[in-house]
Image (spheres, rainbow, N blue to C red):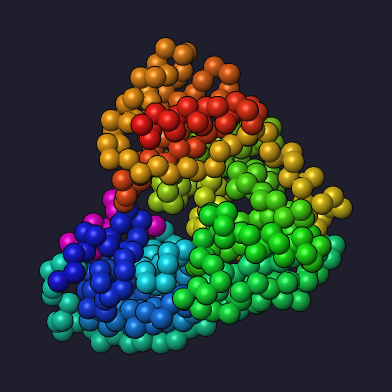
Amino acid sequence: MNDLHSIIKAYDVRGVVPDEWDEDVARRIGAAFAELMAAESGATAVVTAHDMRESSVPLSRAFAEGVLSRGVDVLEAGLGSTDLLYFASGSLGVPGAVFTASHNPARYNGIKLCRAGAAPVGQESGLATIREWAERDAYDRVPARTASIAQRDVLPAYAAHLRSLVDLSGIRPLRVVVDAGNGMGGHTVPVVLADLPLTVLPLYFELDGSFPNHEANPLDPANLVDLQAEVRRTGADLGLAFDGDADRVFVVDERGEPVSPSAITALVAVRELAKGRGTTVIHNLITSRAVPEIVREHGGSPVRTRVGHSFIKAEMARTDAVFGGEHSAHYYFRDFWRADTGMLAAMHVLAALGEQSRPLSELTAAYRRYAASGEINSTVEDVAGRTKVVREAFADEGATFDELDGLTVDLPDGSWFNLRASNTEPLLRLNVEAPDEARMTSLRDRVLEMVRA
């Protein structure tokens, strides 16, 4: 039997198909998930959705068989982005599962699971139990009730809900290039942004899980090149790039220059705070220090968290935060069941731009205060040893340290960096921020030299 420890990660299920997991494994996971949800909350139905990968339909159908084997109904939403699945779970009040490997290459697939109301399921909050129960090899048994499967098209309701949260009908006309990367943005964007003062210039909207044009991972600058060129060529007002499952969005301005996710976090936070329905904004510890500064300047209360959606969603629930943002371009909204949605963040950017006359580069300049390195990965054999070397090197320089998530080092001149290990690979991830580009570069190079020695 496939090793479930290798595919059930910190936040989701992810692995190569069929080498690491297949329909039999999907069936076991479906049974275990349904059993856990029924035991926890008496759930009698689960909603599913899937992306455009070749393996997604067979895997989702096998998962559904496992769910049905526990006497739990299945509502199939069909093709959908991850945030569409969160909408379905939230609006229908049932647990959910979406079959996607997000930005991973074509041979991968995965499952993102949630409780009713789009509440997270992570390693410490259910995934470990699901793995244990799936390993029992006992899904084939007579259920307590006869369950059924039905189709449910939620795309129109998803679009209507988003449009009720951000009204774009009165903005000035905008031209926007959207790169869907052959992923699920090509399915959802035409419906959500229809009949608005927008000219959408599509790039790679054809659903194709082989990703013939580029990887659907806009975090890698190489995958933004086509979008940047098209924005410049067409004279568009901005560009949007969605990842494979369209739960993240990256923004480029009218010059084709990337707008950092920290700047987008600050921009959306200001808009959410202006509604006057709450003051808490969550940001992970990798986002720019400009984010908590700007939140405070607009009457908000910033709360710093570890990296990762399960931590952010838990903290949003604890604090009743109105919004949360991560450096990786995940954006979370209280009005969206505290779940992450790239589409809603994109609509906020469109609204902010279209409600005034300046270009996006000028609009976002106020949210960029420091020079940042972005995330830099280094393959390291001895992660703990290299981290210790770095800490000792800065111990005599007036630095302060915290270990909320990896090692964060704050320096007296306002510079800081975070060094944290990958959950799944022998990698150290470095993020550096400083008052200016020269200081950032020198600090970045110094730390990398120690990490890679």
Residue at figure coordinates x 61%, y 59% from the top left:
224
- Is residue 229 found left or right of 35 in the rendered image? right
Residue at figure coordinates x 51%, y 60% from the top left:
217
Q: Nearer the viewer, residue 453 or 15?
A: 453
Main SS class of the magenta portion in the image:
helix
Does residue 209 appear in the picture of this structure?
Answer: yes
Membership of 122 in magenta stretch: yes
Q: Nearer the viewer, residue 126 or 256?
A: 256
Residues drawn in magenta: 120-132
x and y, in percent, of residue 418 in the image: 45, 33
Residue at figure coordinates x 45%, y 38% from the top left:
430
Membership of 124 in magenta stretch: yes
Q: Hey, which quadrant is residue 181 in on the image?
A: bottom right
Q: Hey, which quadrant is residue 157 in on the image?
A: bottom right
> Quadrant where the C terminus lies?
top left
- Total numbered labels: 0
Q: Nearer the viewer, residue 263 or 226?
A: 226
